[in-house]
Amino acid sequence: MELLEDSLLALITETATNLPADVRKVLAAAGRLERPNTQAGQALQIISLNVDMAKENVGPICQDTGMPTFEVKTPVGVSQIEIKRAIRSMIEEATRRGKLRPNSVDSVTGKNSGLNLGPGTPVIHFEQWEEDEIEVKLLLKGGGCENKNIQYSLPADLEIVGKAARDLEGVYKCVMHAVWQAQGQGCSAGFLGVCIGGDRTSGYAGAKEQLFRDAGDTNPDPLLAELEARVMANADKLGVGTMGFGGDVTLLGCKIGALNRLPASFFVSVAYNCWAYRRMGVRLDPSTGEITRWMYRDADPPKMAAVSGVPTTGREFRLRTPLTEADVRQLTVGDLVMLSGPMFTGRDALHKHLVSHESPVDLNGAVIYHCGPVMMKDGSGRWRVAAAGPTTSIREEPYQADILRKFGVRAVIGKGGMGRKTLDGLRESGAVYLNAVGGAAQFYAEKIVDVTGVDFLEEFGVPEAMWHLEARDFVAVVTMDSKGNSLHADIERSSAAELERLAGVENAQL
């Protein structure tokens, strides 16, 4: 199959850089529902711009290109060993070309392989079938939304929604709870794949399998079709909204399947996928490996963004880093900030390091960006940013307040918000949390005009290194201020109250 590797490289590249046609359609509909001059409306506009830029740049839609998961179906007589070898080879090549971020980390040593290869990476599932062609589907599901997957064991007494029994009503309560618990940390508005039954392992696999369904299809099981429709009718009422900013759109799709189970077990497994719902598929000629047709793809999609630029609210602040305490104290939750000047990336490894070590750079007045970028070198050997959206911030909750106090950091940029310890630290230190739009890796890469240095590259790897960046008009929303206000805490409370109300109303109707 002399064309197999070329076909697989095309599949990986398209999956990372071109949002599927069905997802584009759903996102476009969501954009029409939100009011433009709100935080959610601004976020959806940035998302639309980012989708267009990724297609035009052939760059990663989101910098977290996730765990590559291949579902491969082969006719009798086709070598699965050859296909596996070709997949691994092209994963390595796509990583070199900057289409994938090096994400494969040794769980024992913490070392990044740099090539997206290692035990369990990539994930490849084979199945033999009776058709003549080879089918290869690829799902790129990032770590932020993977962390919001959840599995329930029924019967259970769930927070807010109450008792969930071993029936479809109990399943419904689990799914609604799953939407609520994700908040903005999974880059809402999101999609759900759900599996009823199976065991703990097959249930999660079955939930991810549902993510390969078309966003506009109808479940062939009328009971499950009704359940999907019920979830979709009520999820948006929670008011979580895009990025957890509040708003009218919280869930973009829900697909539910079922597997037989053991009498003693009743699992409900939920795979939460962010708006950057990256999956593609191809059919291949088994003799040549040539692509005979694409699945999910629009090769020449219309532009997502109706206008250029980001709608404003009249409360914008243009600030230059390093920041002063006066710069920060004037900011209030809801303000749109446009930052220019130096900033430094910092994720899990760096935060852990800084708690017990000195910083290699002066962080007084600095901005720390929770980001693991995709980095490439140009022809002169200088680093450039290929993709640079925010990562989920809550992982840094154990460290953030201490780092604010220790180094005089004035702003933290991330997504999904942080907890009470950080909020108290922001108030005490005179600092602020800025929420960038998760997944908008091309939009934010354009805001990084220079890379001026890097620390800990060898020790931590590309995603976890401390990159020194020069930003220009970097757009983010104040969601936690120095006065003790947190939009994330407010939305969590209001959405919990709405979930409780919905559960009470529906329980009363039973």
Image (cartoon, rainbow, N blue to C red):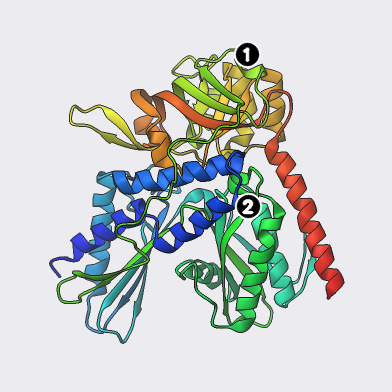
Q: Is residue 60 visible?
A: no
Circle 2 sits on which residue? 182
Task: Tell me the number on the disc at residue 68.
Answer: none
The amino acid type of the residue labelled 1 equals Glu
Q: In which quarter of the view is residue 398 placed?
A: top right
Badge 1 or badge 2: first in the primary sequence:
2
Q: Residue at coordinates 67% horizontally, 70% vertically from top-left?
A: 230
Label 2: state its secondary structure: helix
> Residue 206, position in %: x, y?
52, 72
Please indicate, yes or no, whether residue 242 appears anywhere in the rendered image.
yes
Query: Where, quadrant-wise, is the N terminus in this rendering?
Result: bottom left
480 up-or-down from 54: above or below: above
**Residue 373, horizontal then vertical, whole percent:** 40, 37
Screen quadrant of the C terminus: bottom right
Disc ID at residue 325: 1
Amino acid type at image mark 2: Ala
- Find residue 396 and report its horizontal and vertical position in percent: 58, 36
251 sits left or right of 483 in the view: left
